[in-house]
Amino acid sequence: KGRTVALLSYATDDPNSNAGETSPGNAPFRRQLVIEDVLRARQRAEFILVSVHKGREFVDFPAPEHQADCRAIVDAGADVILGHHPHFLQGIEWRRRPGGRQALIVYSLGSLLVDYEPFLSQAELALFRRSQRNNAVFRIELDGRGVAGLALTPVRQTEDWRVRLETPAEA
């Protein structure tokens, strides 16, 4: 519809996987770096989505410092933050940007389809099995005022590595 969207993507700041001057890798998640990128992208795009690979695995709530980082990035101009890495759904926060535009923070999208089994201890495997349930597909609607709507479709990963809609009782 003639609208421009910027997608910025970052991962946990890790010297072993960060991109370097001459080597490929991740864009490190550093609050000020992301804010600077958002401010630059705001000059060229109507909507800014920020993908963040960060957080503690198998924990169903975001750390307070991660919440503060995400709020600061929204306040700088991001419309949507899509978190992933914990493998559990975490909180969703509606936040008004300065100026009144509606933004959305999804702290963790959950774990749609993943196979970690061979690498996990028994305790981790129990958490992994839990992460295969209670997930969702997110549909985010954007309009001239920012995020206009959000729809969640509950899904789960089956034992045979498929993703299916949850029953009403499961949802």
Image (tube, rainbow, N blue to C red):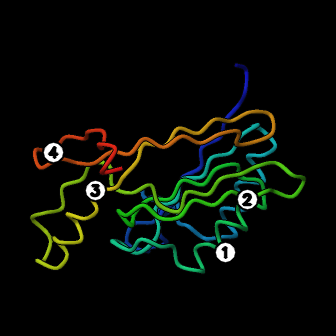
Q: Position of residue 129 (x, y in %)?
A: 20, 63
Label disc, if present, on residue 161 of the rendered structure: 4
The first of marks 3 and 2 along the sequence is: 2
Q: CA distance from mark 3 to mark 4?
A: 12 Å
Image quadrant containing the N terminus: top right
Q: Return the residue nearer the eye: 1 or 34.
A: 1
**In front: label 3 or label 2:** 3
**In front: label 3 or label 1:** 3
Residue 143, above or below 161: above
Q: Amino acid at mark 4?
A: Trp
Residue identifier under label 3: 133
Q: CA distance from mark 1 to mark 2?
A: 12 Å
In contact (CB < 8 Å): disc 3 and disc 1: no
Residue 38, above or below 168: below
Circle 3 packing at 10 Å, graded few (<14), some (14-19), many (20+), is: many
Q: Position of residue 21 (x, y in %)?
A: 52, 61
Label disc, if present, on residue 95 of the rendered structure: 2
Q: Return the residue nearer the eye: 91 or 142.
A: 91
Circle 2 packing at 10 Å, graded few (<14), some (14-19), many (20+), is: some
Q: CA distance from mark 1 to mark 4?
A: 35 Å
Residue at image coords 65%, 53%: 104
